[in-house]
Image (cartoon, grey):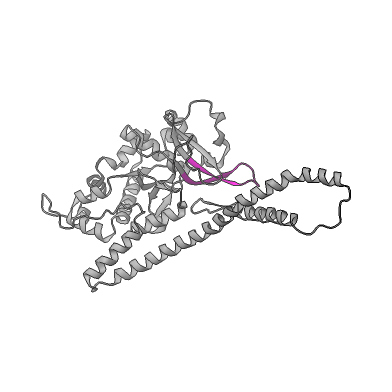
C-alpha cells in the first residue's frame, strides 16, 4: 500500500520495489531457458511444434530483458541521486553557518566563499536578489519602516500587490468584526517580522529604503486567506464554487469527480497571511520536498515557514488574485498540491494538482507527478508559500 507524507503531501510508494521484483523474476525466467533440460522429447514432430509454440515467448522475454536492464540502473541511481542532493544541501547549510561565524575573516576570502556557495545554489529561486545597495540615497531623511503602521509598511513595499484586509473583504463580499480585524492586523505584524528578519532586509527596513525591497518582491503578492466567504460560508472548494462559479467548469455539480472526496468540504486550519509567488518551481527532476528545502535555505527561512499549497489554498489564491488584478497572476503549470486522496480504501494514494484550461480552473489527480506531454504541454511544478508556522 502506498504511504503518504502528511507534512509535504508527497507519495512514497512501493512501486519501485515491486518493479524490481518483476525485473528479477523475468530475468530468472530467461536464465532458466538456458539451463540443463530434464528428460528428452523423442517425437521430433512434437519437439518442433513445442519449439514453435514457445519461440514468441522467448523472443518477448529477451526483448524485455534488454529493456529492463537500463530501467534497473535508473531505479538504483534515482535513489542515489536523491541522497546526493540531500548531502549537498546539508554541506551548504554547514558552510553558510561557518561563514556567518567568520566576522573577522579576510574579506576577499569570504567573498570568494560566498560566490562559490551561490554557484552551487544557482538553480534556486531567490527573492533576496543580489546587488541590493545598502547605501542607496533616499529622497527624504531615512526613517525606519518599522515606525509606520504595519499595513502601510506592506503597502510601501508591495504597492498594489498587497491585498489588505479591506480589499479582501471587498473581493469576498464579507465583513470582519472589529475583534477579527485587530487579531488579523496583529498577525500581520508577526508576518512582517518573519519576512524581514534577514540581515540584508533589516538594514534596508531600518534605513527606510523602499525601492530595493520593492524590486526584491516584484513577483510576489501578500494576501490574506480568509476562513469565510460570501454569506458567511466557511471557505471550502464547495463554497468557492458557489460564490465564484465563473472560475470553474460549467455543468452540473454532481458530475464533478472530486465532489465526494474529503478535501471538497475542508476549510483552512485557521485564517492566515501568505506570501505567494507568481512563478512555479519546476519539479521535473526534483521532488517538491527537495525544491522547498532549497527554496527555504536560499531565502534564509525555516523549512516550516515555506509550504507546498494544498488544493484549497491553490484555488483560493487563484480566484482572489484574479479578481483583484482583473487578470491571471499565476503562471500555468501542473500545480502539484500537498493534498492526496484514494479512490478505494486499499488503492494507491493519488496527488491532486491544478491547472488552467479553457478559462477555467481544473482540478485533477493521479498517482505520481503529472509530467509534460505534447498533448498536455504543462510542466509539473509547485507554487511555494511563505506563512507563519
Which residue is most to the bottom? 104
Which residue is most to the right? 42
> Which span is picked out in magenta?
336-353
Q: How many marks?
A: 0
The image position of residue 358, as x and y in percent, is 44, 29
Residue drawn at point x = 26 percent, y = 68 percent: 110
Q: Is residue 170 visible?
A: no
Residue toward you, 113 or 368: 113
The image position of residue 6, as x and y in percent, is 52, 53
Residue toward you, 311 or 74: 74
- Vertical placement of 149 versus 168: above or below? below
Magenta span includes 373: no
The image position of residue 132, as x and y in percent, is 21, 55
Residue drawn at point x = 30 percent, y = 44 percent: 219
Magenta span includes 350: yes
Answer left or right for 266 relative to 177: right
SS assignment for the magenta stretch, majority:
strand
Amino acid at each position: 500500500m502506498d504511504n503518504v507524507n502528511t507534512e509535504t503531501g508527497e507519495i512514497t510508494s512501493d512501486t519501485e520495489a515491486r518493479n524490481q521484483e518483476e525485473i528479477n523474476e523475468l530475468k530468472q525466467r530467461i536464465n532458466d531457458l538456458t539451463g540443463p533440460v530434464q528428460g528428452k522429447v523423442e517425437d521430433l514432430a512434437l519437439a518442433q511444434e513445442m519449439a514453435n509454440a514457445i519461440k514468441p515467448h522467448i523472443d518477448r522475454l529477451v526483448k524485455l530483458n534488454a529493456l529492463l536492464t537500463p530501467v534497473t540502473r535508473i531505479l538504483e541511481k534515482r535513489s542515489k541521486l536523491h541522497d546526493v542532493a540531500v548531502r549537498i544541501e546539508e554541506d551548504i547549510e554547514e558552510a553558510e553557518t561557518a561563514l556567518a561565524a567568520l566576522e573577522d575573516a579576510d574579506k576577499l576570502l569570504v567573498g570568494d566563499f560566498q560566490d562559490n556557495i551561490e554557484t552551487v545554489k544557482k538553480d534556486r529561486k531567490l527573492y533576496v536578489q543580489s546587488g541590493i545597495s545598502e547605501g542607496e540615497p533616499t529622497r527624504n531623511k531615512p526613517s525606519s519602516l518599522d515606525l509606520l503602521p504595519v499595513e502601510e509598511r506592506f503597502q510601501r513595499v508591495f504597492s498594489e500587490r498587497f491585498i489588505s484586509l479591506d480589499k479582501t473583504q471587498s473581493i469576498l463580499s464579507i465583513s470582519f468584526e472589529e475583534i477579527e480585524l485587530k487579531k488579523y492586523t496583529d498577525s500581520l505584524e508577526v508576518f512582517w517580522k518573519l519576512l524581514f528578519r534577514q540581515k540584508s532586509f533589516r538594514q534596508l527596513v531600518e534605513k527606510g529604503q523602499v525601492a530595493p525591497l520593492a524590486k526584491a518582491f516584484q513577483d510576489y503578492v501578500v494576501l490574506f486567506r480568509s476562513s469565510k466567504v460570501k454569506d458567511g460560508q466557511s471557505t471550502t472548494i464547495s463554497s468557492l464554487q458557489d460564490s465564484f462559479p465563473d472560475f470553474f467548469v460549467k455543468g452540473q455539480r454532481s458530475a464533478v469527480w472530486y465532489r465526494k472526496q474529503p478535501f471538497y468540504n475542508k476549510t483552512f486550519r485557521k485564517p492566515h497571511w501568505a506570501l505567494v509567488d507568481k512563478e512555479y518551481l519546476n519539479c521535473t527532476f526534483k521532488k517538491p520536498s527537495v525544491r522547498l528545502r532549497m527554496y527555504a535555505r536560499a531565502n534564509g527561512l525555516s523549512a516550516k515557514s515555506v509550504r507546498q499549497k494544498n488544493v484549497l489554498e491553490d484555488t483560493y489564491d487563484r480566484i482572489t488574485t484574479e479578481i483583484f488584478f482583473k487578470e491571471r497572476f499565476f503562471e500555468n503549470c501542473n500545480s502539484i498540491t500537498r493534498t492526496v486522496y484514494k479512490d478505494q480504501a486499499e488503492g494507491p494514494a493519488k496527488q491532486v494538482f491544478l491547472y488552467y484550461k479553457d478559462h477555467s480552473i481544473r482540478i485533477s489527480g493521479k498517482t505520481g507527478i503529472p509530467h509534460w506531454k505534447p498533448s498536455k504541454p504543462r510542466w509539473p511544478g509547485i507554487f511555494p508559500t511563505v506563512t507563519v508556522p
